[in-house]
Structures are given as structure tokens and as C-alpha cells.
Amino acid sequence: PTDKVTDLGSGDGRIVIAAAGEGVADALGIEINGALVRLSKRSANRLGLKNARFVKESFWKTNVSDRTVVFLYQVPYAMRKLETKLQEELPPGARVVSNDFTFADWKPTEEHGRIRVYTKTTPT
């Protein structure tokens, strides 16, 4: 319940809505497609989820230093740059959940099929 969750490239908002529905403190979707942001907001409002927010923004510009959990499903060429961004910005103990794609240097702390969980262990 104290987690601050972000989905980078949140699409239709399903991850953020699921997290908010489970009672996380703050669930934030970052999506560059305005139509998907509007769809996500309508879905969250329909469900009465006050802890779900969506913003139209490039996740490259989003500061995630207050986030404790980051979800992402990104293509391989973005993963290297994201690895650097998240290592620099996330606080120690934050978790990154990646579907399908891996980081080059950051080793997962858990693996569940094609889902990998990375935990930030040291400040940078």
C-alpha cells in the first residue's frame, strides 16, 4: 500500500489500473499517445480509482526518483538507455518489472518466465 508505481509507456492503462485496484498509494501511467491517456483516465474514473493518474509525456523526460516500482515493456534498443536512466534515478530498494526484454548489465533478482524483476541495490 505504500508503493508508488509507474508504468513507462502505459498504453491503455491496464497495469496502472490493476495496481491502483490493489491499493497501491500512487499509480502513475506515462504515455505519449494522448488518445490512450484519455482512454486510461476514463477507465480509472469509471472504476472510481482516485490513486490512478495518467499523463501525456515522454517517459524519457519523466523523473522517477520518487517511484518504488516501475513496469515496462520496451523494445531492446530502448532498454540500454532505460537501464542507465533507472539506475541513476530510482531510489535504493526500488523494483523494475520488465516483460520480455532484459537489461544488458543489471541482473534480475527474480525471473518468472519472461517477466524479470530488477531491484536497485545501491545509490548512484
Image (cartoon, rainbow, N blue to C red):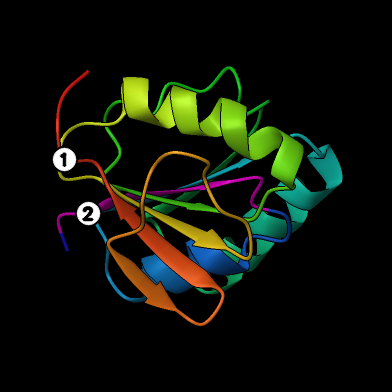
Q: Nearer the viewer, residue 33 or 60?
A: 60
Numbered tag placed on residue 77 in the rendering: none
**Is 34 positioned to the left or the right of 51 in the image?**
right
Q: Position of residue 54 (x, y in %)?
A: 57, 44
Q: CA distance from mark 2 to mark 1?
A: 17 Å
Q: Give the residues drawn in magenta, as a range.
A: 2-10
Q: Count residues near mark 2 (Cα–Cα under 10 Å), then give few for <14, some for 14-19, many for 20+.
A: some
Q: Nearer the viewer, residue 9 or 21?
A: 9
Q: Quadrant of residue 31?
A: top right
Residue type at mark 1: give it.
Thr
Residue type at mark 2: give it.
Asp
Instruction: Identify the residue at horizontal 82%, vertical 39% (top origin).
Output: 33
Q: Nearer the viewer, residue 47 or 89?
A: 89
Instruction: Identify the residue at horizontal 51%, vertical 23% (top origin).
Output: 62
Judged from the image, the secondary structure of the residue bearing numbered disc 2 is loop
Q: With respect to residue 20, does 26 lie above or below? A: above
Instruction: Identify the residue at horizontal 37%, vertical 61% (top origin).
Output: 117
Q: Count residues near mark 1 (Cα–Cα under 10 Å), then give few for <14, some for 14-19, many for 20+.
A: few
Judged from the image, the secondary structure of the residue bearing numbered disc 1 is loop
Question: Which image quarter holds the N terminus?
Answer: bottom left
Whether residue 124 is visible: yes
Q: With respect to residue 106, does 15 lie above or below? A: below
Q: Circle 2 is placed at which residue position?
A: 3
**Is 69 positioned to the left or the right of 61 in the image?**
left
Whether residue 48 is visible: no
**Is 45 positioned to the left or the right of 50 in the image?**
right
**Is 44 positioned to the left or the right of 50 in the image?**
right
Numbered tag placed on residue 121 in the rendering: 1
Q: How many marks?
A: 2
Give the mark nearest the N terminus, 2 or 1: 2
